[in-house]
Image (cartoon, rainbow, N blue to C red):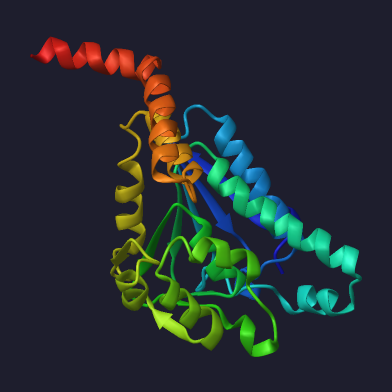
């Protein structure tokens, strides 16, 4: 049985922070403690200036199989206010993942289902092994992945999102890549090494530039074109004044 105090593992190696969902005996199913642990780990990574990228993985065979049975039991018995608080807690996690300055990568092996698929979808980048499976089966028990819908609608086409959310079927890693849910698919044998190589690509890139780019990308969701351009002007100005930009320009000019 996994110690609840170790339900989320956090480790930093150079500029790479690894967050591991550590409930392998429960297929890393979401519960209150795991969600709280994820928030704490993400805040810790964001506060560490040395961290350039975060990778979220699952211990054992699966990434995350959604809510566990005990959590579902509580949902069925909870009051309106209790269910609202629980839903808001998950919303806070999804918001936090976008507010973290550095890229947050989901490294998915095995199954990412229901809330687990939502967790992967909420990451900035999704890397999957060839045997990974994705799906939103909530509809089969009369549930709606409502907050995830806001993320999925911005990730895949409207018709793909509708199909995934209303049929509840699982799709393969390659199918997920083809529709834009997954960025890259790596072989099972080399997955861990490939994820590390990919993630470390962010270590030599300006942290401030990545943070500004991430913020701008999500900030312009739903903006009119002119408004988005104007927001880009503001971000451009801020970027020009950063230490990274000043040093980068000086270094570039020296090479010319």
Which residue is rendered at x = 61% and y = 54% of the image?
Answer: 94
Q: Is residue 96 left or right of residue 170?
A: right
Q: Is residue 79 left or right of residue 247?
A: right
Q: Is residue 154 visible?
A: yes
In the rendered image, residue 105, in percent from the top left (x then y), is placed at 44, 52
Which residue is rendered at x = 47% and y = 74% of the image?
Answer: 161
Placement of 165 over or under 151, stated as above or below? below
In the rendered image, residue 14, in percent from the top left (x then y), is placed at 42, 34
Q: Nearer the viewer, residue 110 or 101?
A: 101
Position of the N terminus by quadrant: bottom right
Q: Nearer the viewer, residue 22 or 70?
A: 70
Quadrant of the rendered image containing residue 188: bottom left
In the rendered image, residue 67, in percent from the top left (x then y), is placed at 68, 73
Q: Is residue 58 visible?
A: no
In the rendered image, residue 227, in percent from the top left (x then y), is placed at 45, 38
Placement of 130 over or under 43, stated as above or below? below
Quadrant of the rendered image containing residue 149: bottom right
Placement of 137 over or under 248, stated as above or below? below
Q: Is residue 221 left or right of residue 198?
A: right
Position of the C terminus by quadrant: top left
Numbered circles on residues, count: 0
Which residue is rendered at x = 77% and y = 73% of the image?
Answer: 71
């Amino acid at each position: 049985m996994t110690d609840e105090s170790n339900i989320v593992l956090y480790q930093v190696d150079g500029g790479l922070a690894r967050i591991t969902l550590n409930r392998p005996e429960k297929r890393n199913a979401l519960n209150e403690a795991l969600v709280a642990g994820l928030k704490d780990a993400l805040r810790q990574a964001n506060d560490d200036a040395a961290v350039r990228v975060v990778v979220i993985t699952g211990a054992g065979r699966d990434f995350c199989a959604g809510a566990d049975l005990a959590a579902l039991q509580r949902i069925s018995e909870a009051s309106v206010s209790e269910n609202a608080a629980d839903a808001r807690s998950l919303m806070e996690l999804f918001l936090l993942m976008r507010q973290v300055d550095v890229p947050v990568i989901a490294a998915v092996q095995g199954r990412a289902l229901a809330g687990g698929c939502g967790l992967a979808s909420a990451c900035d980048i999704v890397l999957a092994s060839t045997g990974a499976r994705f799906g939103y089966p909530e509809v089969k028990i009369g549930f709606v992945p409502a907050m995830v819908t806001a993320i999925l609608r911005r990730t895949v086409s409207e018709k793909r999102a509708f199909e995934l959310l209303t049929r509840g079927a699982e799709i393969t890693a390659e199918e997920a890549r083809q529709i834009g849910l997954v960025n890259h698919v790596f072989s099972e044998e080399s997955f861990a090494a490939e994820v590390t190589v990919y993630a470390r690509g962010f270590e030599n890139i300006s942290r401030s530039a990545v943070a500004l780019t991430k913020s701008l990308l999500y900030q312009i969701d739903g903006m009119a074109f002119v408004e988005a351009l104007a927001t880009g002007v503001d971000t451009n100005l801020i970027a020009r004044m950063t230490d990274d930009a000043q040093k980068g320009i000086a270094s570039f000019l020296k090479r010319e």
